[in-house]
């Protein structure tokens, strides 16, 4: 007997962030106009602001698709508070508060809360398939994170002692305790090269995910004393008959190949319990890349503001108009003349064009802006006519000196179809930083100012966007600013009615840490295809091959203790 059209398949999201993976699973439907098969039963997140975002989105998904109440949109338009919204719908708000769990895995008291909730959801019945998704915090694996630690003198020992390297054991503990039919684990590509005590951590993670109970027994922390649970680990982009022949890079998913307007590359592992003899299909690449302009062109135009002091639109306009009196505008000379000099006349013409396009009446945006928006790409996914505008669309403040750099960088990109390097800036616009000379001499940190180009997917949106906008400059010089939270969310493929709670820096941080929901929905399609083919399971079927499992693992030289 196959499980067909299975409804309310429980999904547990650990290290959920603002819910990018959850959103993909919650939004996935096998056919247009039908309800989705997945139910996000629990999302666990330790950050208080991201947790509030999860709670609000969980409330939204308590209603059938397309039937969220009008008051939800009133909240998004800042007409009522969240407390007022939740007070009007006590049943749905209670469910949302139950599903979104503010907790830190690894904290003893929080672990008890999480286990109690999972016990309630799953009830020990492994005959009903459920899905575990999420990924441990990525800072310890990231190449940037490792570079920063070494620059700060922490070095390899700090890398080895970083507790975040082993937070995946908490993910593993949930697998061992509750035996999901399928799990999806996501992380940064830096985990492929990260080492702990001379061992590449990725190979250990793969082996541990294949034999979760054995791995935890070896850790001497979790109290497991037996084996008998195995998973097959699959790539979502490369299909081979023998998974052991997969190269680590075969697990990398390049989001821009799958309809996401961002070159976000992540490692995603798909685990299927070994008693489920079903091989998943892989993601289907899209023919065309989704570009930055395609996703952002319909959003309301904004102007930047000054970090301090606060200025009026007229003062902003007057300040940028002064570019015409700057020496670097009158006669462009790069800090370092390259082997292939650029067309200075073309650059001047571009700057002239955008100076004429400056407007003194542009707003700086708001948490809600009334507007008509419609993307040319997937309006069914991104747009919601009931919203009647745009949320989280506020231009951040910048230092006055940076506004000239942003204008120059965006005009340069428009002229030559590439973002300028530090050597391309006029000397008058070079930042007064100690490593600028190093950038000019050796090319280090020479992409300090990066424009998101119109005709290609965006570069990776990271949580660093919360600190400054230098790596995410808007392509329109006449707006002279970095990306807003909503623009970053569009590039991450979040729907327009997805509201990020918290101060703006925290909103940016949430977006930068997320998995693109549109990619997650395609992963959910693969997972659903696997689950829909599962025969009715014997609750003990996955424990039936303990002896074979032991023989297999012992033959690899690993000692097994059987209870």
Image (cartoon, grey):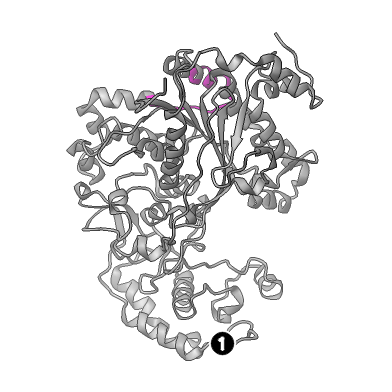
Quadrant housing residue 160: top right
| Residue segment shown in magenta | 99-114
Residue 331 vs residue 271, the one in the foreground: 271
Outermost left residue: 70
Residue 149 vs residue 179, the one in the foreground: 179
> Does the image show residue 308?
no
Quadrant into which the N terminus falls: top left
Q: Is residue 556 left or right of residue 179?
A: right
Q: Is residue 104 magenta?
A: yes
Outermost front residue: 1
Residue 542 in picture, x, y percent from top left = 58, 17
Residue 424 in picture, x, y percent from top left = 57, 79
> Does the image show residue 459?
yes
Seen in the picture, residue 349 relative to 318 is either above or below; the reply is below
Q: Residue at x 44, y 71 (%)?
A: 403
Residue 306 in picture, x, y percent from top left = 40, 65
Quadrant into which the C terminus falls: top right
Residue 437 vs residue 3, the one in the foreground: 3
Seen in the picture, residue 264 relative to 527 is either above or below; the reply is below
Q: Is residue 478 magenta?
A: no
Q: Quick one: SS at disc 1?
A: loop
What residue does disc 1 label? 333
Quadrant housing residue 35: top left
Q: Residue at x 28, y 64 (%)?
A: 363
Q: Residue at x 69, y 42 (%)?
A: 245
Q: Is residue 476 left or right of residue 93?
A: right
Q: Is residue 97 left or right of residue 13?
A: left
Residue 86 vs residue 70, the one in the foreground: 70
The crowding category of the residue bearing disc 1, from other C-alpha atoms within 10 Å (few below 14, some 14 to 19, many at least 20), is: some
């Amino acid at each position: 007997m196959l499980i067909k059209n299975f409804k309310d398949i429980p999904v547990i999201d650990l290290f959920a962030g603002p819910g990018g993976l959850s959103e993909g699973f919650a939004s996935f439907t096998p056919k247009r106009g039908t309800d989705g098969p997945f139910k996000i039963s629990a999302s666990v997140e330790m950050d208080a602001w991201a947790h509030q975002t999860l709670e609000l989105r969980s409330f939204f998904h308590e209603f059938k698709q397309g039937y969220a109440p009008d008051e939800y949109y009133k909240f998004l338009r800042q007409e009522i508070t969240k407390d007022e919204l939740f007070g009007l719908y006590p049943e749905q708000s209670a469910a949302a508060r139950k599903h979104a769990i503010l907790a830190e895995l690894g904290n003893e008291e929080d672990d008890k809360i999480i286990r109690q909730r999972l016990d309630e959801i799953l009830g020990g019945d492994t005959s009903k398939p459920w899905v575990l998704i999420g990924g441990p915090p990525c800072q310890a694996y990231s190449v940037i994170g490792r570079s920063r630690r070494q620059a700060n003198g922490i070095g390899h020992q700090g890398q080895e002692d970083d507790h975040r390297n082993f937070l995946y054991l908490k993910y593993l503990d949930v697998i061992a305790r509750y035996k999901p039919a399928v799990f999806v684990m996501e992380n940064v590509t830096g985990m492929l090269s990260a080492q702990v005590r001379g061992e590449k951590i990725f190979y250990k993670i793969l082996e541990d995910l294949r034999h979760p109970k054995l791995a935890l027994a070896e850790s001497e922390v979790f109290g497991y004393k037996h084996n008998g649970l195995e998973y097959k680990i699959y790539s979502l982009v490369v299909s081979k008959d023998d998974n052991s022949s997969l190269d680590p890079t075969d697990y990398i998913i390049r989001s821009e190949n799958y309809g996401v307007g961002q070159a976000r590359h992540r490692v995603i592992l798909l685990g299927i319990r070994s008693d489920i003899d079903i091989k998943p299909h892989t993601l289907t690449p899209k023919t065309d890349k989704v570009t930055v302009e395609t996703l952002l062109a319909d959003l309301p135009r904004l102007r930047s503001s000054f970090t301090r002091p606060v200025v009026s639109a007229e003062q902003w306009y007057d300040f940028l108009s002064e570019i015409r009196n700057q020496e670097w505008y009158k006669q462009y000379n790069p800090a370092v003349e390259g082997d292939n000099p650029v067309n200075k006349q073309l650059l001047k013409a571009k700057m002239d064009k955008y100076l004429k396009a400056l407007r003194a009446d542009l707003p700086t945006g708001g948490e809600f802006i009334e507007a008509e928006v419609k993307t040319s790409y997937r309006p069914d996914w991104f747009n919601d006519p009931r919203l009647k505008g745009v949320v989280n669309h506020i231009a951040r403040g910048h230092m006055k000196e940076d506004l000239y750099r942003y204008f120059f960088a965006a005009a340069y990109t428009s002229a030559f179809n590439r973002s300028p390097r530090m050597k391309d800036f006029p000397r008058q616009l070079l930042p007064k930083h100690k490593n600028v000379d190093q950038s000019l001499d050796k090319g280090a940190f020479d992409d300090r100012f990066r424009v998101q180009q119109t005709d290609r997917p965006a570069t990776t949106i990271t949580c660093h966007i919360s600190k400054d906008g230098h790596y995410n400059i808007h392509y329109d010089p006449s707006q002279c600013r970095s990306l807003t939270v909503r623009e970053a969310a569009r590039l991450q493929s979040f729907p327009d009615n997805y509201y990020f709670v918290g101060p703006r820096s925290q909103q940016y941080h949430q977006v930068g840490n997320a998995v693109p929901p549109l990619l997650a929905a395609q992963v959910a399609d693969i997972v659903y295809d696997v689950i829909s083919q599962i025969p009715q399971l014997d609750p003990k079927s996955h424990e039936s091959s303990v002896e074979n499992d032991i023989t297999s693992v012992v033959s690899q030289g690993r000692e097994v203790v059987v209870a």
